[in-house]
Amino acid sequence: MEHTLEGKLLSLPLEFDGKSIINFTSLFDRIKVRFKSVKREEQIYFAVDKLSVEDFVADIRIEMVAKNPENQSASDFISNFINTNSKQVFDRYSILYKETCKNILRSLVDGILEKKPAKKLFSE
């Protein structure tokens, strides 16, 4: 995977790019969905009432290779920091995509459930 890094390390500005290899160990999600009844056109349908997503990861290992060899020591420092604190880093940044995942799942499930009335979902 390609990466671009922009920011500061202590007070030193950083801006470089390169390749990354990321390995997630035992990554899994727990998704909980609670449904509600919705009356539409004289029929009862189901829809998502609440949806939650929890992520679990045992470990993350990252290896970053800078395109410019002069930036490799900073890449090694960042890789080492992430590898040493992988659980905290994952917990902090997984928030960035969780809400998007929840919205996509809600839309998909609601899209399926709106096609058939509740009684037809459980008929033989």
Image (cartoon, rainbow, N blue to C red):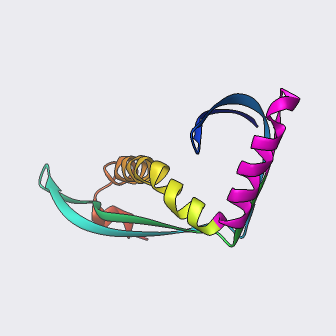
Q: Which residue is drawn at 34% across and 51% down?
A: 110
- What range of the chain is rendered magenta? 63-86
Q: In which quarter of the image is residue 50?
A: bottom left
Q: What is the x, y in percent for residue 21?
A: 80, 46
Between 43 and 112, the one nearer to me in the picture: 112
Q: Residue furthest right?
A: 69
Please tell me whether residue 43 is drawn above or below residue 54 in the rendered image: above
Report the residue at 58% width, 60% height from top.
89
Residue 37 in view of the camera? yes
78 magenta-colored: yes
Answer with left or right where residue 3 lies relative to residue 48. right
Picture coordinates of residue 64 (x, y %)?
80, 43
Total labels: the figure holds: 0
Q: Where is residue 68 in the image (x, y as percent from the top left)?
A: 84, 26
Which quarter of the image is occupied by the C terminus?
bottom left
**Which residue lies at the image location 71% right of the left edge and 70% below the top edge?**
26
